[in-house]
Image: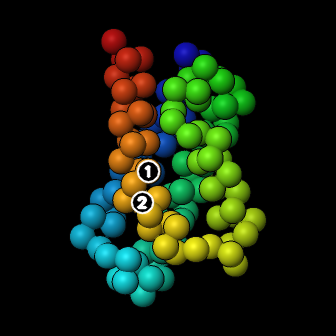
Amino acid sequence: MQPKSLKLLEDIREAATFIRDATQKSTIELYRQDKLLRFAVERNFEIIGEAIKRLATTDQQTAGQIGDYQQIIAFRNVLIHGYDLVDHVLVWSTVKNQVPKLLIDVQALLKSKSN
């Protein structure tokens, strides 16, 4: 693993953990109403996508061990470049269905690299 890869994986884990924790007691209805929460979640998805994009550029082997990493990068691009097209239901679905899987993948990678 490249030296920078560990830092990028830590950034991904930190952002995904924030999303999980910030939305843990929320619902889609509350999420839609809470502009600050939406912006915070979207910003952390942008961080995740950018970190994975950098990881894919510098350490393809490690990036390839993150499920759906190319879709995560594409999601980041939509959030940044298509900010006016953001579908809150899709974001919420990603929060609830994909973030837990991402955390498992990243934590496994970090654990394997620390041994």
Q: Is residue 62 left or right of residue 92?
A: right
The residue located at (65%, 24%) in the rendering is 60
Can you say whether 39 is above or below 5 in the image? Answer: below
Q: Tag 2: residue type?
A: Val
Tags 2 and 1 in contact by the CB under 8 Å rule?
A: yes
Secondary structure category for the residue under label 1: loop
Residue occupied by mark 1: 98
Dot 1, how many residues are within 10 Å of its Cα: few (below 14), some (14-19), or many (20+)? some
Q: Residue at coordinates 42% horizontally, 60% vertically from top-left? A: 95
Question: Which amino acid type is shown beneath numbered disc 1?
Answer: Gln
113 relative to 57, above or below: above
* Residue 95: numbered disc: 2
Side of 48 where 101 appears, left or right: left
Where residue 50 appears, as percent x and y from the top left, is: 64, 47
Spatial CA span between label 2 and label 1: 6 Å
Residue 107: assigned label:
none
User: Does residue 34 appear in the picture of this structure?
Assistant: no
Few, some or many residues within 10 Å of mark 2 (<14, 14–19, 20+): some
Q: Quadrant of residue 29?
A: bottom left
Expressed as whole percent of the image width and height from the top left, the position of residue 11 reads 49, 42
Q: Quadrant of residue 4?
A: top right
Percent position (x, y) of residue 26?
29, 74
